[in-house]
Amino acid sequence: MDLAEEVGRDAHGTVVQVPPGLLRPALAGIVPYEPGKPVEEVQRELGLERVVKLASNEGPYGPFPQALEALERRKVES
């Protein structure tokens, strides 16, 4: 008798198993978060001297135009 059920694979392809009934079905297919590479590894892999590491919620392009428009609308409403 199998005491665990396969719910997916992690970022490395390893089978993830949990006791039956432990996870809601909607959560069963979620892949675990895989952190980004360290700056030194990116520099070495890509042959770069300077690398700027951004947090998960940062981007190099600034806010979306729709976000700026929403802020402006809110400012006018206040």
Image (cartoon, rainbow, N blue to C red):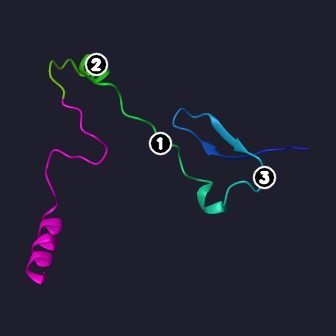
Q: Which residues are magenta?
A: 52-78
Mark 3 lies on a secondary structure that is loop
Earlier-in-chain disc, 1 versus 2? 1
Q: Which residue is mark 1?
A: 33
Q: Amino acid at mark 2?
A: Glu
Q: Which residue is mark 3?
A: 20
CA–CA distance between discs 1 and 2?
21 Å
Above/below status of 35 relative to 76: above
Whether residues under marks 1 and 3 lie with C-beta atoms below 8 angstroms apart, the answer is: no
Could you tell me which residue is drawn at 63 percent across and 54 percent down?
28
| Residue 35 percent across, percent down from the top left | 41, 35
Q: Which residue is mark 2?
A: 40
Residue at (28, 19) in percent of width and height: 40
Would you call the spot at circle 2 few (<14 residues within 10 Å), some (14-19), or many (20 or more)? few
* 6 up-or-down from 65: above or below: above
Q: Residue furthest right?
A: 1
Q: Amino acid at mark 1?
A: Tyr
Q: Earlier in the sequence, mark 1 or mark 3?
A: 3
How far across and how far down the image is residue 12, in percent? 53, 32
SS assignment at label 2: helix
* Residue 2: percent from left, percent from top: 86, 43
Q: Neighbour class for label 1 at 10 Å: few (<14), some, many (≥20)?
A: few
Tag 3: amino acid: Pro
- Left or right side of 39 for 66: left
